[in-house]
Image (cartoon, grey):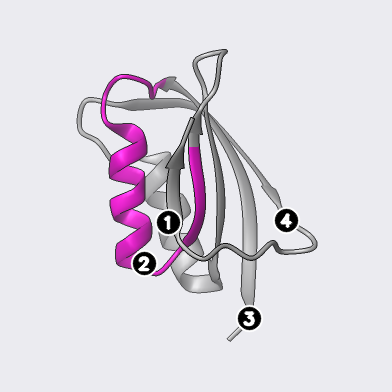
Amino acid sequence: MATNGVHIIVSGRVQGVGFRWMTKMVAAKLHITGTVANQMDGSVEIYAVGASDQLAQFEAAVKASPTPSGRVSDYQATPLDPVPTFKNFDVIG
């Protein structure tokens, strides 16, 4: 099964609403590795690596906001090439 990676930047109501921690829970459920971090401009940056079908499910969950009180107003995703290796999915920053 091919492993793919994506770099995601989301903005909207994505800080102070549990967005990073809920993203981590979704990643764990789908066996996605990578990182999620708040950015100084109010956005959230995500690096995600996993099997194609799980990665697609992960991206859909992030777009829809994994937390009920969050709202994604802008979503930008760029494929990662080469695909980095992460051991876990970590909340950083």
User: In the drawing, what numbered circle is on residue 80?
Assistant: 4
Q: Is residue 67 magenta?
A: no
* Residue found at the very far right of the displayed protein: 82
Which SS class for mark 2?
A: helix
User: Which residue is tagged 1?
Assistant: 58
Please determine whether, in this image, residue 73 is positioned above or below residue 34. above
Label annotation for residue 77: none
Instruction: Identify the residue shown where x is 53% and y is 74%.
Output: 51
Compare residues 74 and 15 and report the one nearer the observer: 15
**Furthest-top residue in this view:** 41
Quarter-of-image position of residue 79: bottom right
N-terminal of the two: label 1 or label 4?
1
Residue under label 3 = 2
**Which residue is drawn at the image coordinates 38% and 57% (left, top)?**
27
Quick check: 22 left or right of 5?
A: left
Task: Look at the numbered disc 1 and give the secondary structure of its residue.
Answer: helix
Residue depicted at x 44% and y 49%: 90
Q: Magenta stretch?
A: 13-36
Query: 87 left or right of 67?
Result: right
- Give, as a three-letter code, the residue at label 1: Phe
> Dividing the picture into quarters, in which one does residue 83 lie?
bottom right
Which quarter shows the N terminus? bottom right
Tell me if mark 4 has few (under 14), some (14-19) or many (20+) residues whose alpha carbon lies within 10 angstroms of its own. some
> Where in the figure is residue 16, as x and y percent of width and height?
30, 19
Distance from disc 4 to disc 2, alpha carbons, whole Å, reads: 19 Å
Image x and y of residue 60, in percent: 42, 51
